[in-house]
Image (cartoon, rainbow, N blue to C red):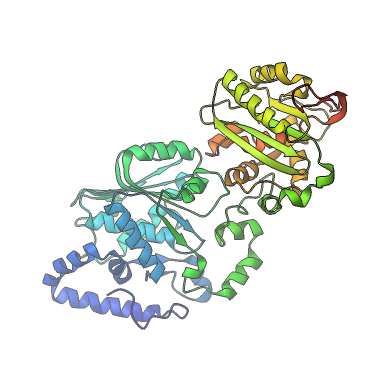
């Protein structure tokens, strides 16, 4: 039963495995009365059933003269995974799988689905992915249902569903076992979770699914157990959030868990793959797994490693700048940033409040920080509620409060709008700056992607980020506000009663 003791993962002898399987099957057919007891055993020992009778497929084997269809022998980490998923299913508990590439996880998930189909009466196993072709495409070995059909078709007749006919019982995106009323169903894209209730549901490459929050909401109402499986795809998305929430059981498949791989294999991957692909698909590095993040993660990591004392000369402390990003939508937050020269000293965050409450809280914070030194600018995001907040603050602190409309188009030929300009200035500043070691700030800075429009830099909109399941980058936007309008000269003495100073702004902004 299971993987033979003599098996060598780096020098596989598949012929011997086939011979042993044939011998087992011949012995069973001579004593068919043993089969019911064996099925009872397999009902609680899925890993043995996989390694005893299932197959896998690898077209790369043809290049070295080996059969492309071969026995599916589970290595120890795969066995652990199959049992882990079974435990999640029986406990009606969700799970997340963070994987390296080429670990056979898709085959394991398909094998689990077949075990459910055979041994769990009335069960429904669901599969969803971002594209339908990844779920089911006739003749495509990369699709999940192609793998499922191959596994079932190559099982001995004694273990296939009674009366099973692939042409009738395995149509597009569906496999049925009429004898025990179990099934395997497929969905794709925005339809994931819409097809009815499921006992267990696998979301394939979950970090790449669009509208992932809507998918999660749909599945929460239809599936007892959700298993989200993926390689990393950047920080901040729903897969990343679940992975780091501490609330979902996590199973990690690292390439070192594969007994077929070693340091030489890894070196070959380094030579063949781009750094971004290697980071995502082999090293499971979330921060380095995207190509078009506007602010690279290493820049942020280095800035977080610096302390304020590393970048500020205490003998000549620069004035303080404040950025206030006012919450606009339901899950957005107000963020109050305090920057002094090369250091972001503090960020204060609070939930969405009305105009008066936001202005009142900001006023208290400004007064507190004014005792630490001159404040030369208070930049407020004036889109939405921010305009009213800026007016209230201006009544107390004068012209040092400046309005910032991030959507304002620019004509400098480099930046499409003021938001792109602010972020570009912030990106340059980060290369030698100090910022707090705050995970929310890190994600906020690195999650925003970029492109160009008419040759000018244009950052990903908040609406587009929300489609990817990324929260509004409130922390980063608040810091960016401190770069919106350059200060040129002192206009007046500090306002009596505090140390807030007034300055003119540079008119040569190209707005």
Quadrant for the C terminus in the image: top right
Number of numbered discs on residues:
0
Residue 121, horizontal then vertical, whole percent: 20, 52
Q: Viewer-proximal residue, 229 or 497?
A: 497
Residue 468, horizontal then vertical, whole percent: 54, 39
Q: Is residue 482 visible?
A: no
Residue at 15% in and 68% down: 37
The image shows residue 392, relative to residue 10, as above or below, that is above
Position of residue 263 in the picture relative to residue 190 (left or right) = right
Residue 425, horizontal then vertical, whole percent: 77, 39
**Farthest left residue in view:** 33
Residue at 39% in and 55% down: 146
The image shows residue 371, relative to residue 116, as above or below, that is above
Position of residue 151 in the picture relative to residue 300 (left or right) = left
Residue at 46% in and 60% down: 252
Residue at 47% in and 78% down: 10
Position of residue 471 in the picture relative to residue 173 (left or right) = right
Q: Is residue 436 visible?
A: yes
The image shows residue 206, relative to residue 339, as above or below, that is below
Quadrant for the N terminus in the image: bottom left
Q: Viewer-proximal residue, 243 or 502?
A: 502
Please identify the quarter of the rendering in which residue 347 is found: top right
Q: Viewer-proximal residue, 502 or 255?
A: 502
Please identify the quarter of the rendering in which residue 392 is found: top right
**Farthest bottom residue in view:** 6
């Amino acid at each position: 039963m299971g993987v033979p003791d003599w098996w060598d993962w780096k020098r596989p002898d598949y012929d011997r495995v086939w011979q042993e399987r044939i011998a087992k099957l011949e012995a069973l057919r001579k004593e068919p009365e043993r089969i019911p007891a064996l099925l009872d055993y397999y009902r609680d020992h899925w890993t043995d059933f996989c390694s005893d009778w299932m197959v896998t497929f690898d077209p790369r084997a043809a290049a070295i003269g080996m059969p492309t269809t071969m026995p599916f022998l589970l290595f120890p980490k795969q066995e652990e995974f199959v049992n882990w998923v079974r435990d999640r299913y029986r406990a009606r508990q969700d799970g997340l799988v963070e994987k390296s590439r080429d670990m056979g996880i898709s085959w394991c998930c398909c094998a689990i689905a077949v075990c459910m189909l055979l041994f769990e009466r009335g069960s429904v196993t669901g599969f969803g992915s971002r594209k339908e072709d990844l779920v089911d495409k006739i003749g495509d070995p990369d699709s999940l249902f192609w793998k499922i059909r191959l596994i079932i078709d190559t099982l001995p007749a004694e273990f296939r569903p009674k009366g099973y006919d692939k042409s009738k019982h395995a149509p597009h995106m569906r496999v049925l076992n009429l004898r025990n009323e179990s099934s395997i169903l497929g969905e794709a894209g925005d339809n994931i979770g819409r097809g009815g209730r499921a006992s267990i549901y696998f979301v394939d490459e979950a970090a790449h699914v669009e509208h992932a929050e809507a998918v999660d909401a749909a599945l929460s109402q239809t599936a007892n157990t959700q298993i989200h499986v993926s390689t990393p795809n950047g920080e901040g998305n729903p897969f990343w959030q679940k992975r780091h929430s501490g609330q979902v059981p996590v199973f990690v498949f690292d390439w070192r868990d594969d007994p077929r791989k070693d340091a030489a294999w890894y070196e070959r991957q380094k030579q063949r793959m781009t750094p971004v692909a290697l980071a995502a698909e082999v090293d499971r590095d979330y921060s380095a797994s995207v190509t078009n993040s506007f602010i690279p993660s290493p820049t942020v990591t280095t800035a977080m490693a610096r302390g304020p004392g590393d970048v500020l000369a205490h003998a000549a402390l620069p004035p303080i700048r404040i950025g206030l990003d006012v919450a606009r939508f339901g899950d957005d937050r107000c963020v109050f940033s305090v920057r002094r020269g090369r250091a972001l000293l503090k960020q204060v965050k609070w939930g969405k409040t009305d105009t008066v409450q936001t202005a009142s809280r900001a006023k208290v914070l400004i007064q507190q920080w004014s005792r630490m030194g001159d404040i030369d600018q208070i930049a407020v995001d004036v889109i939405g509620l921010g305009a009213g907040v800026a007016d209230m603050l201006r009544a107390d602190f004068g012209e040092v409060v400046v309005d910032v409309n991030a959507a304002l188009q620019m004509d400098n030929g480099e930046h499409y709008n003021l938001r792109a300009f602010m972020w570009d200035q912030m990106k340059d500043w980060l290369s030698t700056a100090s910022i707090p070691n705050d995970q929310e700030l890190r994600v906020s800075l690195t999650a925003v992607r970029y492109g160009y429009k008419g040759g000018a830099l244009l950052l990903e909109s908040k609406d587009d980020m929300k489609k990817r399941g990324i929260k509004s980058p409130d922390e980063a936007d608040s810091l960016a506000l401190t770069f919106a309008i350059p200060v040129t000269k002192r206009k007046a003495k500090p306002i009596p009663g505090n140390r807030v100073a007034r300055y003119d702004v540079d008119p040569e902004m190209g707005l």
